[in-house]
Image (cartoon, rainbow, N blue to C red):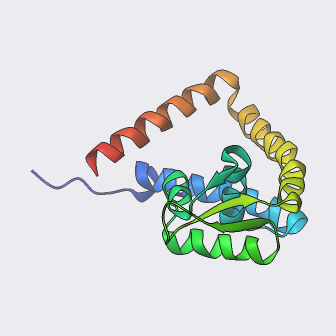
Amino acid sequence: MPQKTLKLSAFLPYQLSITSNAVSDLIARAYRGKFALKVPEWRVMALLGEAEVATQRELVAATAMDKVTVNRACKTLEERALVSRVPNSSDGRSHHLALTAAGRSLYDQIVPEALQLEAGLEKILGSGEAKQLEIMLAQLRARVIELG
């Protein structure tokens, strides 16, 4: 039996990747111009805005970004005085990261825009389809983690 050919434009992993890149690029354009943030920096800030305090290891796990990307984002945010770094007393090697007052202020400015951007994306699909997509993506992520 002849091997089935791969049509990249219809290949699910490719479609997920280019869609993710398109959404990330949309976010990057919005945040880079207005807030001078790259997507990894915003992801770190968003998690710290939600969790209040985290280690870099926790940020890596929560964002699914690699260690180098998270480290660079944290260094940039620290240099801009948006994030503080305090040694972890229970682990001499890691640090607790948290938003500074300036970081919290910037986070509070970005959140309404982030929610507006999300609403715009959901409007493309409709609320029912957006919720279905969220559920399907969560199922896909969980299964991929199981397979990995």
- 75 or 5, which is in the foreground? 75
- 93 or 52, which is in the foreground? 93
Q: Locate residue 129 relative to residue 30 in the image: left or right.
A: left
For residue 112, what is the image quadrant? top right
- 35 or 118, which is in the foreground? 35
Is residue 26 visible in the rendered image? The answer is no
The image shows residue 78 at horizontal and vertical percentages of 74, 73
Q: Looking at the image, is 86 positioned above or below residue 146?
A: below
The image shows residue 33 at horizontal and vertical percentages of 87, 68
Question: Given the current orientation, which residue lies at the most extreme front position?
Answer: 89
- 36 or 2, which is in the foreground? 36
Residue found at x 45% / y 56%: 14
Residue found at x 27% / y 46%: 147
The image shows residue 96 at horizontal and vertical percentages of 62, 61
Residue found at x 82% / y 46%: 111
Is residue 114 visible in the rendered image? The answer is yes
Question: Given the current orientation, which residue lies at the most extreme left position?
Answer: 1
Residue found at x 55% / y 32%: 133
Tag count in the figure? 0
